[in-house]
Image (tube, rainbow, N blue to C red):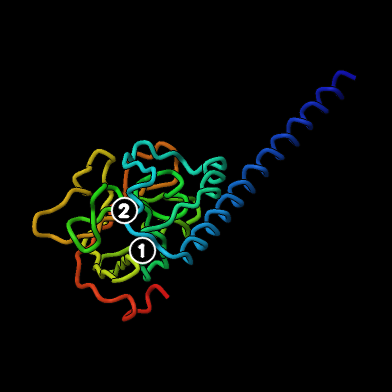
Amino acid sequence: MKKRVITSIKLFSLVLLLAIGLILVFNEQIKDKVIDNMTQTVLRRKTQSVAKAKKEKSSFEFKKVKPASISAVKDAWKDDGQAIGKLAIPAVNLKLSIFYGLRNENLLRGTGTMKKDEKMGQGNYALAGHHMNDPQILFSPLAKVKKGDMVYLTDGKRVYEYRVTDRKVVNEYQVQWIQDVPGEKLVTLVTCLTAKTGENNRIIVRGKLLKNIPLKETKVFR
């Protein structure tokens, strides 16, 4: 009788662990699907001006960015903040909205600006985003970017074309990468090296401005 009880307990524990594992796996898949849906929905919306965005709640502290948990995704789903622009890297099939600041809600629906007063086509335009387990969503595709790839930004009126000149892995303390470089017009994209919580290394993708043209003269954002 005692052996049967022990066997039943072991079987129950095994089934419980299996059920928990399945829930975690499917929760991750559901979360990624919701994030993908949010990013695509926001991309179809009109952008707002930076001046208007500055009046809204924002944050620029990367260290306060939280992992992409289910509860965080739920909060982002309810958020209706408008983007200030769009980003595209055709070589890795990346297209995201750009939001003002690094609020968690922003980074789960696109990418966020890392400095308060940066402007497209001027100085060093720095953007940050999440690296996810799904290699296709948010900033995960940065892992596949190569030198020579094109990066496009738009504010809804003009398109700014950059060519990637550097792709590096640095530690989290090398913040000089987001600072302006005298005489240079740059874009710098930042994400964690992996999707693991507590990841200390960052992927840096940097490009130099080639030109800017009216939005209607390119099909990149259509």
**Residue 22 found in image quarter:** top right
Q: Secondary structure at mark 1?
A: strand
**Image quadrant where one finds the C terminus:** bottom left
Spot the residue most to the right: 1
**Image quadrant where one finds the N terminus:** top right
- The circle on residue 87 is 1
Q: Is residue 197 left or right of residue 26?
A: left
**Residue 2 found in image quarter:** top right
Callout 2 touching callout 1 (CB < 8 Å): yes
**Residue 49 found in image quarter:** bottom left
The residue shown at (45%, 52%) is: 81
Q: Secondary structure at mark 2?
A: strand
Between the C-alphas of marks 2 and 1, the distance is 10 Å
Binning the other alpha carbons within 10 Å of mark 1 as few (below 14), some (14 to 19) or many (20 upward) gives many
**What residue is pinned by disc 2?**
127
Binning the other alpha carbons within 10 Å of mark 2 as few (below 14), some (14 to 19) or many (20 upward) gives many
